Image (cartoon, rainbow, N blue to C red):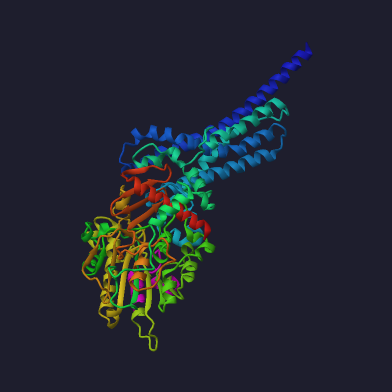
Amino acid sequence: MAEYENFEVILHIIYISMRNAVLKIVAYFATFVIIFVLQKPVFLAVYASGIGASPLGSLWPVVAHGLAMDCSMAGYLTAIPALLVIASLWTRSRAIGIVGNIYSAIVATAISIVFCLDIVLYGYWGFRLDMTPLFYFTTSPAAAMASAGGWMIVAGIAGCAALAAALYLVLTRLPGRITVAPSRNAPATVAATLLTAALFIPIRGGVTVSTMNLSRAYFSQNQRLNHAAINPMFSLMYSATHQSDFASQYRFMEPAEAAEIFATLTDRPSERPDTALSLSTTPRPDIVIVILESFSSHLMPSLGGDSVAMGLDSVARNGLLFSRFYANSFRTDRALTSILSAYPGQPSTSVMKYVEKMENLPSLPRTLKENGWEPSYFYGGDANFTNMLAYLVRSGFEKITSDKDFPLAERTSKWGAHDHLLFDKAAADILAPRPGDSRPRLDVIQTSISHEPFEVPYDTPRFSAIDPRVNAFAYTDSCLTAFVNRLAASPSWDNTLLLIVPDHYGAWPRNLDNPLDRHAVPLVVTGGALALPRRVIDTPGCQTDIAATLLGSLGIPHDDFIFSKDMLNPESPHYGVFTERDLIGLISDTDTAVVNLDTGDTVPPHSSPKATTEAKAFLQTLYDNLSNL
């Protein structure tokens, strides 16, 4: 009888141990899932106006379609607690509890930081959190934080800390309170081990051929509802694991097919026909390129926009305007390589992260320098931001002006020196006498103040009453206008070619759903050396085409710029291309396609089969090229 009772006791101990072990693992998993699910109504509430749908009515489909991704992330986060549970079955060491608490603190902090960053940055960027902010912060913390106001930073830190503390209490007081006694029995260990191994199923996203990816959350034609369903921690992890091995990304077709299609999209610069137009009346003009922060076509009446950038609009009406022009990307680091290297922006990464690859990019400034031009660069902010300084030096710029070249009293903007000071410094240098130096100049000026938080030394009630960002654009436009007028009044104007282009898609109007509208930007050319005054060119193109168009006009070969096409050459292929975190668009004379890169589907109404195939071949070729740089 005693032996029977002892056997019952042993079975009871085994049962309790197994039950608690299994329960603790399940409790951790369920807690993480609930935490992620509860983030979704918060996101919907914060961005209700931009989503254009009822947050309450959208909640169920958002939660339902994002649940698999939430479970996947919960599986990753449960793996270590599950291993600690298994260890607890064999030892009573206090170290296990301490490690568990430390892990809970780390995870609670990570979840809160990701959630707070994502909820704030989505309003600026329009996509869920990825590795981009980390790249910006590591290259220049001050510049990375410049978009945010002081109150926002303080509130964000406080909110993040409070959320982390709350999550830590949840993790330690719910699953953390379930006691697993060291029974040292095989059944409980086997059960806990099998359950830990079973986490592979939600982590992978099921047992089908397809593994978990961002496309699993897509269910709606409303892109913001799809974004609401995405788990921000998974989005960040997915981005982190797609920062290398570029040759394996965006595989849409066989390499030979992609190469054949891309060949039809490539310029043939060796023979420029007589029918091709030229930008310049002289083969060696002084060239000035102004890169405007966040401008768009929607600020110019001549392009059907609002009456905001009236100075730029006047310059365009009297100069040369490319009316079907597109910003190639969505951030400045990608834009600079598009404009100065004719290298398209990448959806999942930035080539400027990789100095060893950056050094192999073609360079418009370097090509001009090799042909006799003297290049200079002017920027009012931190040139180290996003590895910009390394890129500029490698691109051939020997003289680079940045924030450190302005007196401290003039660096009153969060981005450095205000734009009027930047233009003043650039104009003074450009117009300064150069005795004995007959080389033509290349001067690139990059503005920065028409950017969040849009704080400028300029207040016109007509614009500030609409929106602070509109007022900021009007400010930079006034600075640009004064700069152009100053150059136009100088003797060197007759030999000057001035190109004006935004860096990336515009910040006004807000929340443009149509990607083509979002990426529409002006390319304006003026100057006394302009051969085509008062003309509008409706040939479709994008920022990568500046190099081939300018070099072609100057009679300089541009064979190295394989992604660039001469927009003034009737025999060149004419199309614009742009990318975002989750899409690529291609616009030609006859076809348009926008492809969702998470799902592989076209974005209505942009569904031309021909353009869709071309866009996919273009992106696949770009990543092959990136892999081989």
What is the total number of numbered labels drawn onto the structure image?
Answer: 0
Highlighted range, magenta? 403-427
Q: Is residue 95 left or right of residue 41?
A: right
Q: Looking at this view, is 513 or 13 the one in front?
A: 513
Task: Locate residue 224, reporting x and y percent.
Answer: 36, 43
For the N terminus, the image quarter is top right
- Dominant SS type (magenta): helix
* Rendering quarter of residue 335: bottom left
Write the residue at 25% across / 65% down: 321
Write the residue at 36% across / 68% down: 271
Task: Locate residue 443, reporting x and y percent.
Answer: 37, 74
Please say whether residue 148 is visible from this viewpoint. no
* Rendering quarter of residue 44: top left
Q: Looking at this view, is 586 or 445 the one in front?
A: 586
Check the image and report above or below for 582 versus 273. Answer: above
* Rendering quarter of residue 280: bottom left
Q: Judge whether residue 568 is colored magenta.
A: no
Check the image and report above or below for 34 versus 340. Answer: above
